[in-house]
Amino acid sequence: MRQLIPHPLLSGSLVLMWLLLTRFSPGHLVLGSMIALLAGWTVERLTLARPRIRRWQAIPRLAGLVAWDILRSNISVARVLLLGPNHPDYHSGFIELRLTLRDQNALALLAIILAATPGTAWLEYDRESGRLLLHVLDLRSEDDWQVLIRDRYERLLGEIFE
């Protein structure tokens, strides 16, 4: 049975979500079930490292910092949009950061954090050199971003995962 439905919780959740979004009908039940099974088989083929959390105590602190930074970024992006892109205080640009994180789960979580923060976009990551290319909507100083990522996120993610 495990080979037919490798991730039953994921598949069941997807079928339920499908039916909630499309109104229940036998056709949608069949289509949603096929999509859910395909998603379960796809996830089974991925070779993901199982996360090993070393310090659970750091997770609430990281969540609080991320929530605060997302709030501040929303305000900053709103200010940029109100001032307009031609305002002299507005500077967007690309920055190259050096990351010390090597754990796949920590890097994935950092990518999610940066993608969820308005005004930043994770563009490219080179695993060998640890180089991250990031686009920032309101770029004031590359050094400030390096310190922000290293001291706020990398340190806590390293405590949690490495």
Image (spheres, grey):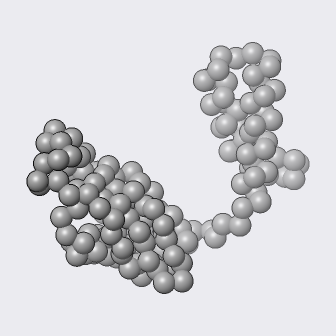
Q: Quadrant of residue 127?
A: bottom right
Q: Position of residue 36 (x, y in %)?
A: 74, 39
Identified at 50% across, 79% down, the residue is 102
The answer, for residue 110, to whether it is visible in the render is yes
Apparent side of residue 56 relative to residue 29 in the rendered image (left or right): left
The answer, for residue 62, to whether it is visible in the render is no
Identified at 29% across, 62% down, the residue is 93
Q: Position of residue 117 (x, y in %)?
A: 34, 52
Q: Quadrant of residue 46?
A: bottom right
Residue in the foreground of this view, choosing between 160 and 75:
75
Q: How many marks?
A: 0
- 1 relative to 113, above or below: above
Identified at 36% across, 73% down, the residue is 96
The single residue placed furthest to the front in the displayed view is 86
Residue in the foreground of this view, choosing between 148 and 103:
148
Apparent side of residue 21 relative to residue 148 in the rendered image (left or right): right
Q: Position of residue 152 (x, y in %)?
A: 28, 70
Apparent side of residue 35 relative to residue 50 in the rendered image (left or right): right
- 36 relative to 20, above or below: below
Identified at 78% across, 28% down, the residue is 31
Q: Position of residue 75 (x, y in %)?
A: 19, 45
- 9 relative to 91, above or below: above
- 42 relative to 36, above or below: below
